[in-house]
Amino acid sequence: MAIGRIARLLIANRGEISVRIARTCREMGIRSIAVYSDADRDALHVRECDEAVHIGPAPARESYLDRDRILAAARRTRADAIHPGYGFLSENAEFAQACIERGLVFVGPSPAAMRAVGDKVAAKLSADEVGVPTVPGYLGEDQRLEALADNARRIGVPLLVKAAAGGGGKGMRLVRDLAQFEDAIDGAKREAKSAFNDDTVFLERYIESPRHVEVQILADHLGNAIELGERDCSIQRRHQKIVEESPSPAVSPALRARLGDAALRIAGAVGYTNAGTVEFMLDAAGAFYFLEVNARLQVEHPVTETVTGLDLVRAQLEIASGKRLSLEQESVQRRGHAIEVRLYAEDPDAGFLPSSGRILSLDLPSGEGVRVDAGVAVGSLVTSDYDPMLAKIIVSGHNRAEALERMRQALDHTYVAGIATNVEFLRWIAAHPVFAQGGATTDFLERYKWPGAALDDRAMLDTQLAAAGALQELSGWRLGAQSRVIRFAKPAQREIEVEFDWRDAAWRARADSAEALIKPAEPAGSFKLRSGNSTARFEAWRLADGIELAVGAPKERRLVTLDTLEDVTHAGAHALGHTGAGSATAPMTGTIVKVAIRVGDEVKAHETLALLEAMKMEHAVAAPYDGRVTAVFVKPGDRVDAGVVLAEIEPST
């Protein structure tokens, strides 16, 4: 329970949410305390907080998920409260209870309320009891495959397999063919066990093309509760939200009132306190169904803050301190429209594989109606150990059209060098006519395919290599490497030419009349731009295995590897999760969670060989062609670096 004013707050998280919480702490005169792992020693959230304490190695289970280390850090720094942010321990009732038992204020709901809504099965039963509609399915305790399969046949396809604990799309599988059911159960249970230490699942009918709409609530310890309107989070990939906005273009005033009432009824049924989000699905006919309660601050909370003018972190801290809600329902006002997009370290042109590396340059938007919540800065190291989100870009306007135009302009002024990001993907969404008309549903990305380079079509990044001089097969920066030109062409856009300049012992990149001289001895990001009498049209940075170019306005990312043409081809295959040359390699650093092959197995092209977990998601490593497995070098639990050979395959003749 509350202890009065919070003076010292430990933020049990990392990245942008820690930076964001620290900002409110400064405004409230609260001393903020960061925690960090080995990988985050120089992270932005460490610099932004008043104090920081080391809590362990990079793997989250040994640092950010280790409640004993977190509690020890709170004791060592004399914290009187802990804010868990989102993810990690934010919805762990045992952690919340441990905080209370040690005299610490847990900034969130009570352990009892967290347990009541944290188990999605129990939450659905609570919703049924207060008359809030839920999706038909199976909520039983029998977790045997036979029982689950029987109920799957009863429900019919399409259906969803969902983890009973946690959220964020973890432990969720869509089944459209019952022949896939056993694999879906296996994958969902394995992912749920890894993410939440609980592999319980339930089944529910999959509603085609719904909206995903959620209602923000606040409740104090005195029995007062309010709802702050809805957010539309329909554009998702692999059940992970990408774009959020408030209000929803699909919700009328009458429906808004019904959704808000349903959210408060569910909160009241479990005695909920602090900030929370009640999530619903909305079908084409306007009927809504309860999904779950997120017992924490949501990633997308800034859009609600923007339209209501409230600081939800401040509200959380005030409630945790025992204060009464500062607003009554009648006083809540919503003005204008807000949209948020999530900037991820991932490569849409390579199947959205997570990207890691050091940020060499960072352009983030600013101006009227623009807010950026970032967890990185120039020099930040992005690793595969954590969620790939780098920042959130939030815009607002008097209406949706104005907000959307500001989002487009904001994304045009966004660029990250050194790693791949989804910024061009976000630009594509913001420009899409269906999104512009407010018609996006949860299957938006299935209906409208990202037109970037796909696994089976990289023609839009047409690479050519011309060689001159001696017929040597040397590459990279070594002396004696042959002079080469690599051209990257994209339809309706300029051609970029890169060649080795022997006189300057550097790589020279040209686009139209602008050129950059890229010297290997110079620090990343400090390369000279030469443009004659014209303005330089691109920037360049040295990477470990090549150079990165930022082209045009808005900037678009191009990579040039310094290998031979064959190696360039193989590098592209690596990025897609498989390789040539008789081997399959890890596309990124991560942990092997499943090996699906044995020596002697015959495999088909694109067949899954192994599953690798990185940045909290599973990624398939696929066979590059038909063949026979001649060697397997890994087993479940092995941690591997990017490029490590996992298996060797002899091509079929």
Image (cartoon, rainbow, N blue to C red):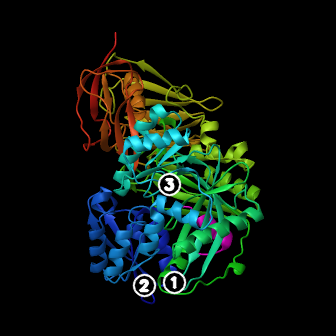
Residue 301 inside the magenta-drawn segment: yes
Q: What predominant SS class does the magenta segment belong to?
A: helix
Q: Nearer the viewer, mark 3 or mark 2?
A: 2
Front position in the image: 627 or 450? 627
Residue identifier under label 2: 1
SS under mark 3: strand
The earlier-in-sequence mark between 2 and 1 is: 2
Q: Amino acid at mark 3?
A: Leu
Q: Local crowd at mark 3 within 10 Å, few (<14), some, or many (≥20)? A: some
SS under mark 2: loop
The part of the chain drawn in magenta is 299-311
Horizontal relation, residue 101 to residue 325: left or right = left
Q: Amino acid at mark 2?
A: Met
The earlier-in-sequence mark between 3 and 1 is: 1
The quadrant in which residue 565 appears is top left
Which residue is pictured at 51% across the width and 83% down the height? 221
Q: Nearer the viewer, mark 3 or mark 1?
A: 1
Look at the image and tell me in which quarter the C terminus lies.
top left
Residue that protrudes farthest toward the bottom in the picture:
4
Look at the image and tell me in which quarter the N terminus lies.
bottom left
Q: Which mark is residue 221?
A: 1
Q: Are marks 2 and 1 in contact (CB under 8 Å)?
A: yes
Residue that protrudes farthest toward the top in the picture:
653
Horizontal relation, residue 500 to residue 450: left or right = left
Horizontal relation, residue 510 to residue 520: left or right = right
